[in-house]
Image (spheres, grey):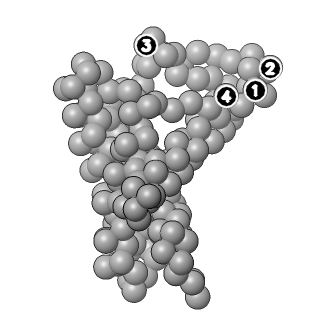
Amino acid sequence: MNRLLDHFLIYGVFGWCAEILWTASHDFMTGSRVDPVDPSVKVPLTPLERWRLCGSTYLWMFPLYGAGGLLFEPLHDALRRHPWPLRGLTWTVLIFLVEYASGRALRRLTGRCPWDYTYARANVHGLIRLDYAPVWFAFGLLLELVHDALNGVART
């Protein structure tokens, strides 16, 4: 396979795995999950269901994570020498923009966005959650490590 396709596939799988870990951890910690029929409803979990640690994602997310990772690679190279707080803030803003734009596009294409944050207080049109800023900050910095590993760049 070529480098571009390899990176796309790795970012897609990495994103899927991260999302499954996130949703399983979130459901375990909160004791509830989003109702698959009505995402604005939270369904309480039994103690046994919490310990099953069932995470979830959407098939739509694979190409979004794959393309997003590729999109951010040149930006990472350009930002590499900047301090990590500035890079993390940059990733947060860019991830919010990609999440919002892709959610809006999916809503137009399919009639519904696979994720629905309307239940959250700090949501923007149900497509992004501003209270997830620290998560995206850390995730963006983590993607830098993935990018460097893919390119064989040693970190100092």
Quick one: 66 or 48, which is closer to the camera? Answer: 66
Quick one: 51 or 76, which is closer to the camera? Answer: 76
Sequence-wise, the earlier of marks 1 and 3 is: 3
Residue at image coords 58%, 44%: 17
Pointer 1 residue: 52
Residue at image coords 75%, 26%: 52
Residue at image coords 44%, 31%: 59
Q: How many residues crowd around disc 3 within 10 Å: few (fewer than 14), some, or many (20 or more)?
A: few
Pointer 4 residue: 54
Pointer 3 residue: 38
Numbered disc 2: secondary structure: helix
Image quadrant assignment for residue 101: top left
Q: How many residues crowd around disc 4 within 10 Å: few (fewer than 14), some, or many (20 or more)?
A: some
Q: How many residues crowd around disc 2 within 10 Å: few (fewer than 14), some, or many (20 or more)?
A: few
* CA gap, disc 4 and disc 1: 6 Å
Q: Is residue 2 visible?
A: yes
Considering every residue shown, the one lying at the far left of the view is 108
Quarter that holds the N terminus: bottom left
- The answer to whether mark 4 and mark 1 are in CB contact below 8 A is yes
* CA gap, disc 2 and disc 1: 6 Å
Q: How many residues crowd around disc 1 within 10 Å: few (fewer than 14), some, or many (20 or more)?
A: few
Numbered disc 4: secondary structure: loop
Pointer 2 residue: 48
